[in-house]
Amino acid sequence: REIDVLNGPNLNLLGTREPGIYGRLTLADIEAQLKARAGDRATLSFRQSNHEGELVTWIQEAGAAGRAVILNAGAYTHTSVALRDAISGAKAEVIEVHLSNVHAREEFRHHSWLSPVCIGVIAGFGPLSYALALEALLERQRTP
Ligand code: DQA
């Protein structure tokens, strides 16, 4: 199974960015952990962009190629109608993930434009959020 793991703005700063909220692992650490967990069960393409339009393009490409997506859209989660339209338009199978429990944080993080067009949402488990999303995608495939 081919899965694109797409990361939005500021996630390139993980490791030093608000470690009390996001932990000490870098995005490269999370990538390595996830690839180790996936083993030969999935081929992961792990990417990060600070640009909304680039994320839109990546979602479109994943949908067109039939690849599933694990998406941490960062702050665009709470602002981007464009990302939402990309998900619904591309008919991409997307799981929304967050490292932090967005519902336990500021009010403006409680709303996601993306959740209604995603298969599901996993938030609050740190890097394990990505791992749980991976398992969910693989399990879904086994028992569709
Ligand atoms: C985040 C939560 C968002 O509210 C925030 O803007 C991020 C990271 C998370 O993974 O917890 O950049 O998506």
Image (spheres, rainbow, N blue to C red):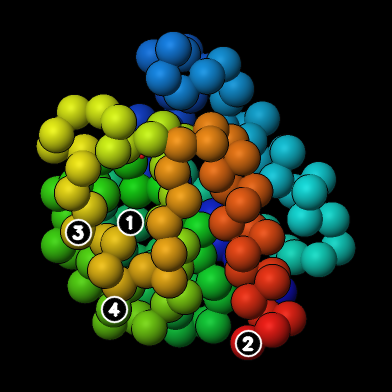
Q: Secondary structure at mark 1?
A: helix
User: In the image, residue 38 lies at what x, y percent?
Assistant: 77, 55
Q: Amino acid at mark 1?
A: Glu
- The disc at residue 88 is 4
Closer to us: mark 2 or mark 3?
Answer: 2
Q: Residues within 10 Å of mark 4 (few under 14, many from 20)?
A: some
Q: Which residue is mark 3?
A: 113
Give me the residue at 31% from left, 37% from top. Answer: 102
User: In the image, residue 130 lies at what x, y percent?
Assistant: 57, 47
**What's the distance in space between the residues labelled 1 and 4, CA to CA?**
16 Å
Closer to us: mark 3 or mark 1?
Answer: 3
Name the outermost residue toward the right: 40
Mark 1 / mark 4, whichever is N-terminal: 1
Q: Which residue is mark 2?
A: 144
Mark 4 / mark 3, whichever is N-terminal: 4
Q: Nearer the viewer, residue 12 or 20?
A: 20
Q: Amino acid at mark 2?
A: Pro
Q: Tell me the quarter of the image containing the N terminus.
A: bottom right
Question: Residue 107: which quarter of the image?
Answer: top left
Q: Residues within 10 Å of mark 2 (few under 14, many from 20)?
A: few
Q: Secondary structure at mark 2?
A: loop
Callout 4 touching callout 3 (CB < 8 Å): no
**What's the distance in space between the residues labelled 4 and 3, CA to CA?**
11 Å
- The disc at residue 54 is 1
22 to 130, vertically: above or below: above
Mark 2 / mark 3, whichever is N-terminal: 3
